[in-house]
Amino acid sequence: MNKEFIRAQLDSLYDLLKQKAQELQEVVKLTRGQRVVLEQSKEAHFHELVKKKQKVMEEIQVIDHEFMQKYQQLRDLIVTESSIYGAEIQKLQQVIGQITDLMQLIYKEEKQIKELMQKQMKQMHERLRQVQYSPDYVAKIYKKQPPKRP
């Protein structure tokens, strides 16, 4: 393969990584939105965000697949001739670093969402339990039911 073709392929890999980074930034935005919506107890909007996020994640999978196909073709050449393509490789590594940072941020946001959801579920469970065993609730039920006649 000639050097210009390889450089063009490396540029293509770079473009795919930049595209993935942009998609991950969208995931960060949607994930933060999910947390805010959960805090405001707007479940319907939460599900909308989940659907949007799922679409973005599917787009990321397509990007990853295309990246891996191109990378597999170039891997051996890049490794053996890294001195020739050092600048291009460095650009790729910088974007990979950005992607790693974004993924760590998403992980932290997802963890916060999980903790918030668990807290809300626990609170809901406690409210249900209080309603089930509340003397006022039991008294209301018995007042509404007519006495049974033998």
Image (spheres, rainbow, N blue to C red):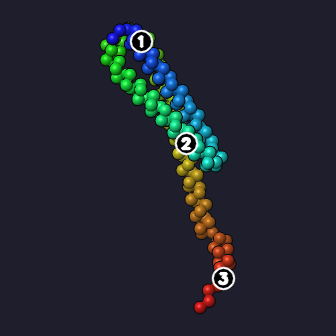
- Where is residue 29 shown, x and y percent of the image? 59, 34
Q: Is residue 139 visible?
A: no
Give the residue drawn at x 56%, y 59%: 125
Could you classify mark 1 by the number of other residues whose Cα lies within 10 Å: few (under 14), some (14-19), or many (20 or more)? some
Reading the chain from its start, which is encountered first: label 1 or label 3?
Answer: 1
* Three-letter code, disc 2: Val
Assign a secondary structure to mark 2. helix
Q: Count the marks: how many?
A: 3
Residue 34 position, x and y percent, is 59, 41
Q: Nearer the viewer, residue 134 or 59?
A: 59
- Residue 150 visible in image: yes
Residue that mark 1 sits on: 7
Which residue in the protein does label 2 denote? 50
- Image disc number at residue 146: 3
Q: Residue at x 47, y 31 (%)?
A: 60
Q: In this view, does 8 lie above or below 117?
A: above
Q: Residues within 10 Å of mark 2 (few under 14, many from 20)?
A: some
